[in-house]
Amino acid sequence: MDFKAMIIIMMSAALVNNYVLSQFLGICPFLGVSKETKSATGMSVAVIFVMLLATAVTWPIQVFLLDRYSLGFLQIIVFILIIASLVQFVEIATKKYIPALYNSLGVFLPLITTNCAVLAAVILNIKENYTFMQSMVNALGAGLGFLLAMVIFSGIREYTENTDPPESFKGIPLTMMSAAILSLSFFGFAGVIENMFG
Amino acid sequence: MDTIIIAVVSVTAISAVCAVILCAASKFMAVKSDERMVKIRECLPGTNCGACGFPGCDGYAAALISGGDVKTNLCAPGGAAVLEQLSGILGVDAGDPAVKTAVVRCGGGDLQQKKKMDYKGIETCMAAKQLFGGEGMCAFGCLGYGDCQAACPGGAICMENKLARVIPGLCTGCGLCVKACPNNLITVDDESIAVAVLCKNMEKGAVVRKKCSSGCIGCKKCVRECEAGAIAVENNLAVIDYEKCTGCGHCAGVCVTKSIKLLAHKDYKI
């Protein structure tokens, strides 16, 4: 598999098809945990971590179990099951062996269990017929895109926090509008990747 | 029929594998958590004020458990009740609760202090301070827009004639107002102190006189009158040494500008 294709997959997952801002997946943490850059970064790192792990586990299961016995219809239920137990396992393991990481990820790790961006990443990997390496690169790109969106948006929110908007814009409306404008700006990436590498 | 059997069997198998792994993990990787931590956390007030010097109530609880020289009397909002509970859980002597109260070190409100302008800007002390040090003549004094009042979680600060006053019965001594004051006028002291110099102006007496009627002019009358020798004048400002102060209140009586005041927090009724 050549290097260029990998770059294209990663860049398009991170920028053009940004999971949060272009595909509107994982909106809950995007709005919920983006009040401070620090916690937004923590959440995103946890998401990257879980996305990579989940891809590494679900890809073999899809290929060697579900495809072989034509059980494609079980995909979602099996993947949810696996992601949930995986997150739980990672939580126990980090608590024991890397307490520093456990403390910094804190409450975000269990939250990821139900994050649809993770499920979307593993399902889209299968849908696009990626190889194992391609799937991993796609998951990494998706995670990095999530990090990018979270960090930018938390920066915007930290800034708007200190402004004095009209009464009716305060709080949620302002957050929603800035999210919409940010999402619009990400559509500007469409076509950039194709022209750069194609 | 075959498909459904395979589906059921494979999902069951996958869940069983996951369950076994999780069970094993929780058994082999279990982390012992101290049950005292939960108890201590329950009896702390949970305001996360930081008066104890640790990051929040969780931080104080963790520090208490970790042993070392952490005392149980550091929780100012909790007071004696929390001190007793903490000492009970940890099995140490209770000792005295260090009861603290905030003191606003300025006596120059609207009535005493002359104005140098008519300030019409944003009504916070921080904003007023940015504009030539506020509207009052004195650059050291209370700005009067109540940043400390807004910071106080217990509603223990009131504004009287543009001067912050601490309501002693309500003050827990958490010290959040200390950080809020842009002129650093508020100190947290032992509740046992009887008198305080309510002025921070370090300019010469004649200059202070022109700006404020209740500022310390550094005349040293209190220094001469104090029988315990507890008062000194440093930087044109009287300073009381509370180690020597007997709390007789004589200095407050003789002070020319009434900048030394008897503090009312002992017999204050709400």
Image: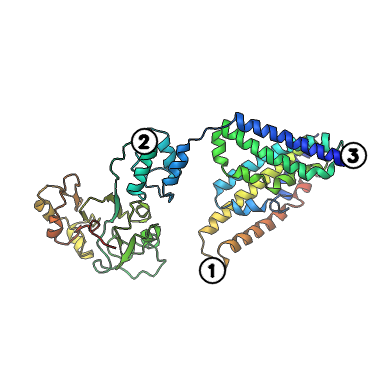
| Mark 2 vs 3, N-terminal side | 3
Q: Which residue is mark 2?
A: B91
Quadrant of image for the C terminus of chain A = top right
Identify the chain of the residue marked 1, using the numbered disc in the image: A
Quadrant of image for the N terminus of chain A = top right
Where B136 falls versus A136 (above or below)?
Answer: below
**How far apart are the alpha carbons under marks 1 and 3?**
63 Å
Query: Does the residue at mark 2 contact the one at mark 1 (Cβ under 8 Å)?
Result: no
Lateral position of residue A171 relative to residue A132, left or right: left
In this view, which residue lies farthest toward the right? B1
**Viewer-proximal residue among B10 and B73:** B10
Q: Nearer the viewer, mark 2 or mark 1?
A: 2
**How far apart are the alpha carbons under marks 2 and 3?**
66 Å
Q: Which residue is mark 1?
A: A167
Amino acid type for the residue under numbered disc 3: Asp
Instruction: Indicate the secondary structure of the residue bearing disc 1.
Output: helix
Residue B164 image offset from top left, x and y in percent:
31, 62
Lateral position of residue B269 relative to residue A85, left or right: left
